[in-house]
Image (cartoon, grey):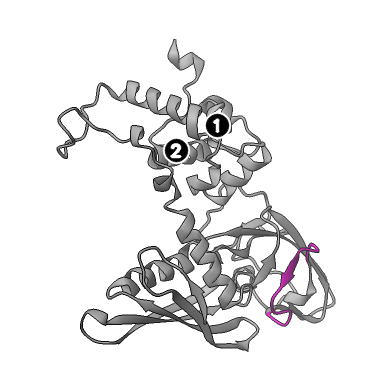
Amino acid sequence: MLPYETSGSTQAIEWKCVESKTEYKRLHYGRFVVSPFKRGQVSTVGTAMRRASLQEVRGTSITSARFQGVVHEYSTITGIQETIHDILANLKEIVPKSDSDDLEEAVLSVTGPKEVTAGDTSLPPYVKAIDDSQYIFTITQPISLNIELRIQKDCGYRIETLSGYRDGELPVDAVSMPVRNVNCSVHLFGSGRATRETSFIEIWTNGSLTPYEAIKEASKKLIDLPTPFLQMKNEDVYSSESGYDGTPPVSTGPSSQIYDMNKQLEGKLSETIFIDQLELPARAFNCLKKAEIHTIADLLSYSREDSSKIRSFGQKSVDQVSKALWDHFTIELPKDESDSN
């Protein structure tokens, strides 16, 4: 077992992979034992690890497909056994693995008759399909079909609408979750005050990450999330001469508070806080990245009007960014000059 020292503990916590197997290409299984914990700690760690594994670990998926001459997802193509809706559903199940965080494009160009699988897709060199034999559709006649695909990294579920897509381009309700399931169990040993706990963690992945890689990534996320609390300084904490009595400071007006917060972030934190922490939808996030907007400071240099002029960045994305800024940091995008007059 591999030891890991924790502050305040008399015995190092150790972990070990006790079982690892590939049930098939898109289902990998791993079982880990971690011990010893004090009583109650396994519940805390296990719950956090499960949520982080399912919600914070990023995966790659196909997010849209563009068909030539197709109007909507319930269309049919002569010579294709499946409907467009069926093809989109099968594309949703494809498991890509990407070494890039950027939006990638792939092409599925085939000529029938043929049973089309994931292995027929022309992918960028740093993207691969975990299972080349994964079924997509069947061409029953001697026709050719070209499908343009977009591939992105994200977390969790992504449900899209048709708004913002080009003619013939249809969204795929992507599931960017490389971890399929996590179980955590607790076992007691010892007695009295010497009672300790052992945790068994079981994890299943879709093959784009091994169980070890997934649990390691989830652990990193859990370490990163509380980092702002570790960076907190004493002068940033509200206090009064008589001591804190549990009552928050009285507001001197919302506009002045927002102004002060903007100034504080611009001066101290905004240059080191990246827009990743806003948890924006993938479309808005990618548009900002392409516009070389990487930090909160970069974002605050744009007014609402300026933001709406960013390429492919509509009013809906502006509203999403404004809401995310307010929800995460209680700040607003700078107002337009015309609004301040």
In this rendering, is residue 316 above or below 103? above
Q: Please report contact status of discs 1 and 2: CB closer than 8 Å, yes or no.
A: no
Q: Work out whether 268 lies above or below 227.
A: above
- Going from N to C along the chain, the mark reached first, 1 or 2, is 1
Taking the magenta stretch, the answer to whether it contains residue 131 is yes
Q: Position of residue 24 (x, y in %)?
A: 63, 87
Which amino acid is tagged 1?
Answer: Ala
Please tell me whether the stretch drawn in magenta is mainly helix, strand or loop: loop
Residue farthest toward the top in the current orientation of the protein:
341
> Can residue 68 be seen?
no
Q: Is residue 328 visible?
A: yes
Instruction: Write the start and end of the magenta stretch as one range.
Output: 123-134
At horizontal 53% and vertical 54% (from top left) the residue drawn is 161
- Residue 297 is tagged as 1
Quarter of the picture holding the C terminus:
top left
Find residue 15 and report its horizontal and vertical position in percent: 49, 79
How crowded pointer 1 is (Cα within 10 Å; few <14, some 14-19, many 20+) is rated as many
Nearest to the observer: residue 140 or residue 1: 1
29 is higher (above) or lower (below) than 216? below
Q: Which mark is residue 325?
A: 2
Q: Position of residue 5 (x, y in %)?
A: 45, 68
| Residue type beneath disc 2 | Leu
Helix, strand or loop for disc 2 = helix
Closer-to-camera residue (212/340): 212
